Image (cartoon, helix red, strand yellow):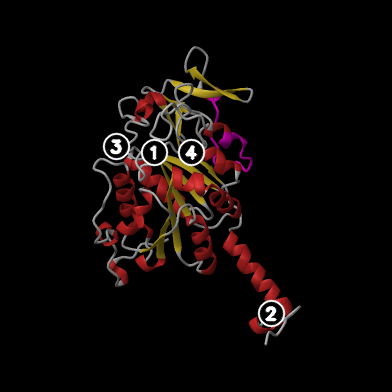
Amino acid sequence: MTVASKEDGVIPLQRKDFVSDQEVRWCPGCGDYSILAQTQKLMPDLGIEREKIVFISGIGCSSRLPYYMNTYGFHSIHGRAPTIATGLKASRPDLQVWVITGDGDGLSIGGNHLLHLMRRNVDLVVVLFNNRIYGLTKGQYSPTSEFGKRTKSSPYGAIDYPVNPLSVTIGAEASFVARSLDIDQHHLISTLERAVKHKGTSFVEVYQNCNVFNDGAYSEFAEKSVRPDRMLMLEHRKPLVYGAEREKGIRMNGMTPEIVDLGNGVTEADLLIHDETDPDPAMAFILSRMHWPQLPEPLGVFRAVERPTFETLMADQIAQETERLGEGDLRTLMMEGDTWEVE
């Protein structure tokens, strides 16, 4: 991707060019504002015309985002954004397509659609806002709510075990899987940039706060004061080191990750080395199962592997069969086989 410059005779786009004239209608203090801001900041650096960018969403607080981007967009129906996005990208592979969804929209009614998007490897970006609650409908428990969570729809505690979004997408063979945090602006924008540049389906889970119906959902490990000791930043081909003084690490005990203190004979050479390009998803899956307080909460790119995209394979197949069989005729196709005339 190249960014337009004045030397090219084209005025470069700025963040303000991607801000629509719509009033942003989220609750004050909502984590959605940060995700929107970082998305708008990123857009000019991609060097893509606004007319070539499409944001598609389903239903929920997160799904209002297309209104606030000065690009093309669809505010579609509940859970079906992946389906609409697949059709659009297959018919217009020149477009940059984003799917904006939430833990309810994407993992409940939209769960099946999300799985098939991942396995097909359609070249688009999925950003899932995860606040562990249904915010738009005022505080019911969602697919990612903790077991025992007391909400308006589970007054005695949720008895559903929560969905782990990264484990699900890794299991569905997603080619790019990452996690970021709404209040870590630098990490969030860099993660979104990585996702856009990946060729294939990019899935980014964003831990996001709902300060009205689930305030402090991730504060136990995500607050800036405790983050270094409770979160683990994944870096490709580097050992899993964390801590305010980088004094702790993660090593494997068989197939189980464990915390070790560096020193007294334990060095970084003993730690697990993160390889986001490993074609075997087993280690990425293990990392996706790490959670505070038993282990530090991982943040970053879990998996980034290359394989052909759905729309490329489809175009190649059409070209191959057209060369073999010639151009098709729609009327002939519709009239062949068993047909009847009704008078």
Residue at screen point 57% across, 63% down? 311
Q: Position of residue 286 (x, y in %)?
A: 57, 32
Q: Quadrant of residue 167?
A: top right
Q: CA distance from mark 4 to mark 1?
A: 10 Å
**Between tags 1 and 3, which lies in front?**
3
The kind of residue tagged 4 is Pro
Q: CA distance from mark 2 to mark 1?
A: 49 Å
Q: Secondary structure at mark 3?
A: loop
Report the residue marked by disc 2.
333
Report the residue marked by disc 1.
131
Report the residue marked by disc 3.
212
Q: Position of residue 233 (x, y in %)?
A: 43, 33
Magenta-drawn segment = 269-285
Q: CA distance from mark 3 to mark 4?
A: 18 Å
Q: Relative to 15, is 339 on the left or the right?
A: right
Q: Is residue 294 magenta?
A: no
Badge 3: residue crowd in 10 Å (few <14, some 14–19, many ≥20) = some
Badge 1: residue crowd in 10 Å (few <14, some 14–19, many ≥20) = many
